Amino acid sequence: MAAAAAYWRVLKAVHKHVGSGASRQRFRDFVTAEFRAPTGTEADAKERLQLAGDYLTSSPASTSTR
């Protein structure tokens, strides 16, 4: 379930911060491919989820004071 939550959070960040059109679609395709790719071991899967979480917490939207 953690993977699904991280996946949707990353897609929402792409939608919010990447321009429109083909550029956004390429990023969405990349994110989808990365989440669907085989992870190998359980440790590899946790590392990839941690990387996605780190990306979200370091994005400008999460650090803004709006």
Image (cartoon, grey):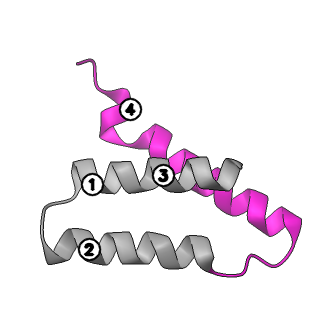
Work out whether residue 64 or residue 42 is closer to the camera in this orientation and state it.
Answer: 42
Q: Residues within 10 Å of mark 3 (few under 14, many from 20)?
A: few
Residue at x-position 87% and y-position 73%: 41
> What residue is disc 4 on?
62
> Dividing the image into 4 quarters, which one contains the C terminus?
top left
Closer to us: mark 4 or mark 3? 3
Q: Which mark is residue 15?
A: 1
Give the Cα distance between marks 4 and 1: 14 Å
> What's under tag 4, amino acid-wise?
Ser
Lower sequence index among marks 1 and 2: 1
Residue 8 picture location, percent across and down: 48, 52
Q: Quadrant of residue 63?
A: top left
Q: Circle 4 — which element? A: helix
> What's under tag 1, amino acid-wise?
His
Q: Circle 1 — which element? A: helix
Residue 54 picture location, percent across and down: 55, 46
Region of the chain picked out in magenta, as a range: 37-66
Q: Circle 3 — which element? A: helix
Lower sequence index among marks 3 and 1: 3
**Left or right of 25 in this view: 9:** right
> What's under tag 3, amino acid-wise?
Trp
> What's under tag 2, amino acid-wise?
Gln
**Left or right of 43 in this view: 59:** left
Give the Cα distance between marks 1 and 2: 9 Å
> What residue is disc 2 on?
25
Residue at x-position 60% and y-position 76%: 36
Residue at x-position 81% and y-position 79%: 40
| Residue placed furthest toward the top | 65
Q: Is residue 45 magenta?
A: yes
Work out whether residue 4 or residue 18 is closer to the camera in this orientation and state it.
Answer: 4
